[in-house]
Every structure is written in structure tokens, then in C-alpha cells.
Image (tube, helix red, strand yellow):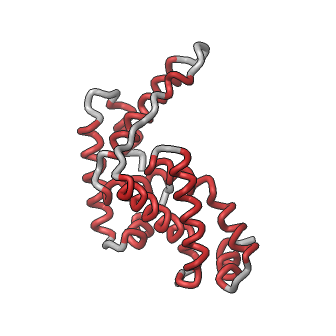
């Protein structure tokens, strides 16, 4: 069924429609929460709290076609709230201990690069971090990000530009070819 129709049904009190909507985005919600809180249990807590708050405030969603963005907005708010409460320093696990000997060095390098990039993203200001995650991980447009963050589109462009520059500086010494290509793809 069309997402907009599901949203309209859910706003009228159809719990099955709301459940279908959540099922559509459960993987994205978890991945986004994990990007922020960096552990499975906290990510699951953030997703659960997000679904709960979305269910309670679904009637407040004015434009059904922004459901996904609205849901991610709630999730990011919940993730930041959890991090503030815990005053938590995000640590990244060394995934190399889970790799088998047969895995190629290329995969190992890719994993290390991904960890470096995630660590660098977490060092950015909250607004830059949100803009980067929404743009590169969720493929949202500048317009959608501006609506989500409640700022003008020009501000989002500035956030993205400054975030890319900051990431380049933070990741200096790493393999610059993959950094430049991954940050300049869009």
C-alpha cells in the first residue's frame, strides 16, 4: 500500500497501518540510532522510544509525505537526549578482532576506513553531524533536511560544506582518495 495512504489510515487510528509504516523503516531507524549511540542496547531503546512517541503524536504530523523525515527527526532527538543524559563518550569497537584470517586486506581496510569516518562524524558539531547523516546515510534532499532541522536551505548547504571540510581535516593521514570520493559523490 502507498505510504501516504498508510499514514492517513494510521492518523485515523488504524494501528495495523502504523505498524506497517514502522516495519517499512525499522532497519533505517536502527542504523541511524546506532550511528548516534554506538551500541546495540541503546540503539534499540532509542528506536523503541521513537516508535512510542511517534504513535502518541501521529495526529500532529501535518504533511503525510514527510512521515519518514518526521520519524527520523524524533529518533535523532531521542538519540541526542539519551547521549546528553548519559553524558556518554562514544567509543568504537575494534571490529578487526571479529575478522577471520581468510578475509582480504581490502575488506579490513574498508572496515577501518568506515570506523575512521564514523569516529570523525561523531566529532562534528551536532548540526553538522545531523546534516551529514541525513544527506549521506538517508539520501534526503537539501529541502527535506532544511525542513527536518527547521533551518533555511542555505544553512543546510553551509552545514554540509563545513562538515565535509571538517571531516577532511579530521581524517588527514588516512587514505584521502576514498575520503574525497565518498564525501563528494553527491
Dividing the picture into quadrants, the one containing residue 4 is bottom right
Residue 128, given in percent of the width and then of the height, sits at: 31, 56
- Viewer-closest of 109 and 142: 109
Residue visible at 37% across and 69% down in the picture: 149
Q: Quadrant of the N terminus?
A: bottom right
Residue visible at 49% across and 23% down in the picture: 96
Residue 74, given in percent of the width and then of the height, sits at: 48, 68
Q: Is residue 64 above or below residue 157?
A: below
Residue visible at 28% across and 54% down in the picture: 125
Left or right of residue 109, residue 170 in this image:
left
Residue 141, given in percent of the width and then of the height, sits at: 45, 63
Residue 41, given in percent of the width and then of the height, sits at: 55, 48
- Viewer-closest of 21 and 84: 84
Dividing the picture into quadrants, the one containing residue 5 is bottom right
Q: Is residue 79 above or below residue 100?
A: below
Dividing the picture into quadrants, the one containing residue 49 is bottom right
Q: Is residue 111 above or below residue 186?
A: above
- Viewer-closest of 90 and 170: 90
Q: How many numbered marks have been drawn onto this rendered protein structure?
A: 0
Residue visible at 34% across and 52% down in the picture: 87
Name, please, the residue furthest toward the top: 101
Amino acid at each position: 500500500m502507498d505510504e501516504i495512504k498508510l499514514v492517513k489510515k494510521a492518523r485515523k487510528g488504524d494501528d495495523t497501518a502504523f505498524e506497517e509504516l514502522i516495519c517499512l523503516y525499522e532497519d533505517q531507524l536502527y542504523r541511524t540510532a546506532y550511528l548516534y549511540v554506538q551500541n546495540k542496547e541503546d540503539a534499540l531503546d532509542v528506536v523503541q522510544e521513537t516508535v512510542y512517541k511517534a504513535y502518541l503524536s501521529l495526529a500532529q504530523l501535518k504533511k503525510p509525505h514527510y512521515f519518514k523525515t518526521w520519524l527520523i527527526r524524533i529518533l535523532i532527538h531521542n538519540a541526542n537526549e539519551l547521549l546528553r543524559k548519559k553524558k556518554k563518550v562514544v567509543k568504537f569497537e575494534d571490529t578487526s578482532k571479529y575478522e577471520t584470517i581468510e578475509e582480504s586486506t581490502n575488506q579490513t581496510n574498508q572496515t577501518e576506513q568506515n570506523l575512521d569516518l564514523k569516529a570523525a562524524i561523531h566529532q562534528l558539531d551536532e548540526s553538522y553531524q545531523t546534516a551529514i547523516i541525513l544527506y549521506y546515510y538517508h539520501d534526503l534532499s537539501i529541502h527535506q533536511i532544511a525542513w527536518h532541522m527547521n533551518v533555511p536551505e542555505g544553512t543546510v548547504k553551509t552545514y554540509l560544506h563545513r562538515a565535509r571540510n571538517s571531516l577532511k581535516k579530521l581524517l588527514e593521514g588516512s587514505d584521502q582518495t576514498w575520503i574525497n570520493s565518498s564525501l563528494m559523490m553527491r
